[in-house]
Amino acid sequence: MAAPRPEFFSADGPEAARWGEERRAMVATLRAMGIRDPRVLAAFEGVPRHRFVPAPERDLAYADTPLPIGLGQTISQPYMVAAMTEALQLTGGEKVLEIGTGSGYQAAILSCLAAKVVTVERHRALGERAWALLAEFTASGGPGFARVTGVVGDGTLGCPEHAPYDAIVVTAASPAVPEPLLRQLADGGRLVVPVGGHGVQTLERHRRQGDQIVSERLMDCVFVPLIGQFGWKE
């Protein structure tokens, strides 16, 4: 990952040192919790999570907890974002689809790790706020943010106009794996998605191998529901 230019964090003013310390502490916590991929850890140290958190919650930006971002949505806890990102097994040249832009933080992380990121958000207001943040970081030298394409729509349908994808990550819980997402996986592509009811779900990884899908369960998790034609009804 390219290092951010100094002006990348200039908007933090006198608090820049504080945020830098908190970011490094967050990365140390992620490492202690089992995140091993050095590229993932570098991305988490390079992306200013506090910029993606609404002002009332900003003091908790680097705590390992989900935080509200409006419209009933959340920014996931850092560990879950890191675990899902690591599970995608990115090496740098992939095209990635994210379902649920939310705050834009996951898309920012992915943009440091892949060649192209397509991110779909059903709430236009959330999406436009997130994409404006990403554009701001691109203009100030943020690493990779120009690689992100934002789309408003039903994430359970994926984004077929940019398919196939080497990796797909879903940041909300679906009652079952959305079939359109499986169809949009490239051969060898990985889909990471929380599956289950409205309580605790299971994070699953599905890998396309030719005409076959190989599935595995990774861990328990808790996410807001995935709304759409192949998810939960609103």
Image: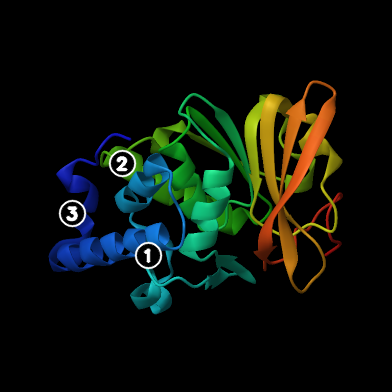
Left or right for 97, reference 56: right
For residue 104, say whether it is visible.
Answer: no
Q: Residue 163 location, x and y as percent?
A: 69, 26
Q: Residue furthest left?
A: 14
Q: Amino acid at mark 3?
A: Ser
Q: CA distance from mark 3 to mark 2?
A: 12 Å
* Marks 3 and 2 in Cβ contact (< 8 Å): no
**Residue carrying label 2:** 142
**Residue carrying label 1:** 29
Left or right for 180, reference 59: right
Task: Point out the tag, 1 or 2, that comes first from the N-terminus.
Answer: 1
**Residue carrying label 3:** 10
* Marks 1 and 3 in Cβ contact (< 8 Å): no
Q: Please tell me which residue is depicted at 37% across the width and 42% down the height of the picture.
A: 38
Task: Point out the tag, 1 or 3, that comes first from the N-terminus.
Answer: 3
Helix, strand or loop at disc 2?
loop
For residue 94, say whether it is visible.
Answer: yes
